[in-house]
């Protein structure tokens, strides 16, 4: 008998692939070129082993775990293995969690079948086979994904990424869009998308190791406009295994998103994908949520429809008048790579002399009794004007300031002046219900401010004129600020011979001096600019006949803003502002004549 008997081994299974979660029925074929006497057994051992290496050289270690082991033995009662082929049926029960073979960065999962013919008093012939092990098919549901770069990703850059589905088949391409939400002027060369494998060594140090990958580079120039840039990654079937968990080495497919910044560390975040194995069932349809400038446009459209405001020009989301000249503007305003909006409410000048700022390091012993207590811990407020007007009681000012700021204590970057309230609101996300809620709150705040302004008192010395000013405001659809008093939002319209309409706006203000109050009118000519040739005529000390009636009531007149505005001054108080309306109408007619236009209702002379 030979001391070194020889034999070869072959494994036959249906389909040539072992399927986890099933009983595998197969045949081991042993081929001996010559008889092998004293052969007692034929052994077959299926083993799955996970390995991961750490370090190199003398400090190198290898973590190795046997994931699954199943032996099988066939007795040979005659004690001889005959020449030629001998077939031995076998059955293996494989667990459903068994992963496929895997080769990563210094880590692997290996499936092997060790075969041996046990021969007494001889060297046993052995063999090693590496069978193909497939993943058990699964059922998955397509899941569109929209995400944003995490906090502290970058000091100014915010990226938005949307995927048609984060659950895909192994032979399906990955598609989506990427957009720059913030940091349009930041210094960077490109955004890189890396679709690749990631092995997590859960059996040892739980570290992650990247494997094979596809990389797509999107130049910065394509992103700076804020528009969403589409991308499409190739299927992973040829190079990257589907997703699996084994509690030894877990394999994920990830989409890495990074920003290529020259001479700096590239910030990066990852999106976890679920890639289903062959034969799996995918339910649902892929879909994508828009990102970037298109997303902001859709958000702005919904905000406008729910509040009556109008869509703004980016970065403004919505804006518009709420009550007369009181207007709201909401602007997309990320800060420090955090999403946020700026809410600005503009109202007529209250002439309270408001000075408002954050408390400084040297303001520890200064208090602001007019502020709500929650706001006073972070800000300083002073009010008052030394222009001869009667003082306003502190209780009145305090109640008004409480309307402005009482519910904004937790907001960031409060700004307040005699004509403006601004606040920055950081938001965790810009989902539609949140943004509509912000727009509605801003609209309600502007309405509350309008009501609070209307409740302010007239100066004591002119309080008898309050009915006349209120009547003028009601008749003309204007907005009254009692503290001045002043009227805002007066509008004068005329249709000229070519059928077009011309319009000017006017505000009647009371200016206080240490001697007495005077009357001042601001005229808005942006819809009917005054030609330069007429500027000198308006300001001349010897006015022409057609402007003389205006100058009789307003001795001082000036052109403003390159013909887009004018001011008319009267050196005395006006108890009833209705007495000024006809002079403003006459001034409007002069503007039209100076422009070479004629009202349709004017008689020919």
Image (cartoon, rainbow, N blue to C red):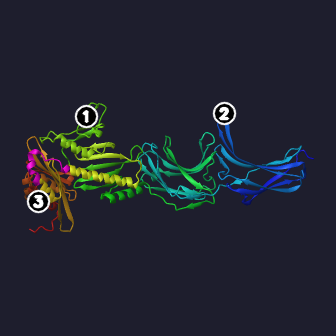
Q: Nearer the viewer, residue 284 or 176?
A: 284
Magenta-highlighted residues: 453-468
Residue 396, percent across and down?
18, 43
Q: Is residue 574 visible?
A: no
Q: Nearer the viewer, residue 199 or 587?
A: 199
Find out whether the residues at labels 1 and 2 contact each other: C-beta distance under 8 Å: no
Question: Callout 1: few (<14), some (14-19), or many (20+) C-alpha neighbours within 10 Å?
Answer: some
Residue 395, percent across and down?
19, 41
Q: Quadrant of the C terminus?
A: bottom left
Q: Nearer the viewer, residue 541 or 132?
A: 132
Q: Is residue 258 above or below residue 489?
A: above
Which label number is shown at residue 552?
Answer: none
Q: CA distance from mark 1 to mark 3?
A: 51 Å
Q: Is residue 447 above or below residue 387?
A: below
Residue at image location 20% in from the left, 64% down from the top: 501
Residue 464 within the segment the image draws in magenta: yes
Which label number is shown at residue 59?
Answer: 2
Q: Is residue 441 above or below residue 598?
A: above
Left or right side of 24 for 354: left
Which label number is shown at residue 586?
Answer: 3
Residue position marked by numbered label 1 in the rendering: 367
Q: Kindly state the secondary structure of the residue where label 1 is placed.
A: loop
Label 1 vs label 2, nearer the camera: 1
Left or right side of 144 for 207: right
């Amino acid at each position: 008998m030979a001391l070194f008997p020889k034999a070869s081994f072959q494994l036959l299974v249906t389909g040539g692939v072992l399927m986890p979660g099933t009983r595998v029925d197969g045949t081991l074929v042993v081929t001996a070129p010559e008889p092998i006497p004293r052969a007692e057994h034929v052994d077959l051992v299926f083993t799955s082993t996970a390995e991961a290496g750490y370090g190199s050289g003398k400090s190198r270690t290898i973590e190795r775990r046997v994931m699954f082991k199943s032996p099988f033995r066939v007795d040979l009662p005659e004690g001889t293995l005959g020449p030629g082929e001998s077939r031995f049926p076998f059955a293996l029960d494989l667990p459903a969690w068994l992963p496929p073979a895997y080769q990563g960065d210094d880590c692997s999962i290996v499936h092997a079948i060790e075969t041996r013919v046990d021969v007494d008093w001889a060297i046993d012939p052995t063999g090693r086979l590496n069978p193909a092990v497939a993943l058990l098919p699964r059922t998955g549901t397509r899941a569109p994904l929209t995400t944003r770069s995490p906090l502290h990703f970058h000091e100014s850059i915010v990226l938005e990424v949307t995927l048609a589905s984060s659950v895909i088949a192994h032979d399906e391409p990955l598609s989506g869009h990427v957009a720059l939400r913030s940091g349009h002027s930041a210094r960077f060369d490109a955004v890189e998308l890396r679709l690749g494998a990631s092995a997590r060594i859960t059996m040892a140090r739980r570290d992650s190791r990247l494997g094979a990958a596809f990389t797509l580079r999107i130049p910065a120039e394509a992103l700076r406009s804020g528009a969403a840039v589409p991308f499409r990654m190739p299927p992973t079937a040829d190079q990257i295994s589907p997703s699996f968990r084994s509690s030894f080495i877990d394999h994920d497919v990830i989409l890495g998103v990074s920003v290529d910044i020259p001479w700096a560390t590239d910030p990066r975040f990852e999106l976890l994908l679920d890639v289903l194995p062959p034969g799996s069932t995918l339910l649902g349809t892929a879909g994508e949520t828009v990102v970037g400038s298109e997303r902001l446009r859709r958000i702005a459209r919904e905000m406008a429809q729910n509040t009556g405001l109008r869509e703004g020009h980016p970065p403004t989301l919505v804006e518009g008048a709420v009550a007369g000249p009181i207007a709201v503007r909401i602007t997309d305003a990320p800060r420090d790579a955090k999403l946020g909006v700026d809410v600005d409410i503009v109202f007529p000048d209250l002439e309270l002399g408001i000075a408002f700022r954050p408390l400084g390091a040297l303001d520890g012993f200064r208090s602001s009794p007019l502020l709500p207590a929650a706001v006073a811990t972070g800000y300083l407020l002073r009010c008052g004007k030394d222009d001869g007007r009667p003082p306003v009681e502190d209780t009145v000012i305090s109640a008004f300031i409480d309307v402005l700021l009482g519910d904004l204590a937790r907001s960031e970057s409060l700004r307040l002046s005699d004509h403006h309230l601004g606040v920055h609101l950081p938001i965790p996300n810009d989902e539609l219900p949140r943004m509509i809620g912000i727009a509605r709150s801003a609209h309600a705040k502007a309405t509350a401010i309008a009501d609070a302004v209307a409740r302010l008192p007239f100066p004591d010395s002119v309080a008898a004129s309050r009915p006349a000013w209120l009547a003028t405001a009601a008749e003309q659809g204007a907005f009254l600020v009692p503290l001045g008093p002043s009227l805002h939002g007066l509008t004068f319209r005329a249709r000229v011979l070519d059928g077009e309409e011309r319009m000017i706006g006017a505000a009647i203000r009371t200016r206080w001096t240490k001697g007495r109050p005077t009357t001042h009118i601001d005229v808005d000519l942006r819809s009917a600019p005054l030609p330069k040739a007429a500027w000198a005529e308006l300001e001349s000390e010897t006015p022409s006949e057609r402007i003389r009636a205006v100058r009789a009531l307003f001795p001082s007149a000036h052109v403003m803003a390159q013909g887009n505005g004018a001011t008319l001054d009267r050196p005395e108080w006006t108890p009833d502002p209705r007495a000024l309306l006809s002079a403003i109408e006459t001034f409007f007619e002069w503007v039209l004549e100076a422009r070479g236009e004629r009202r349709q209702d004017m008689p020919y002379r």
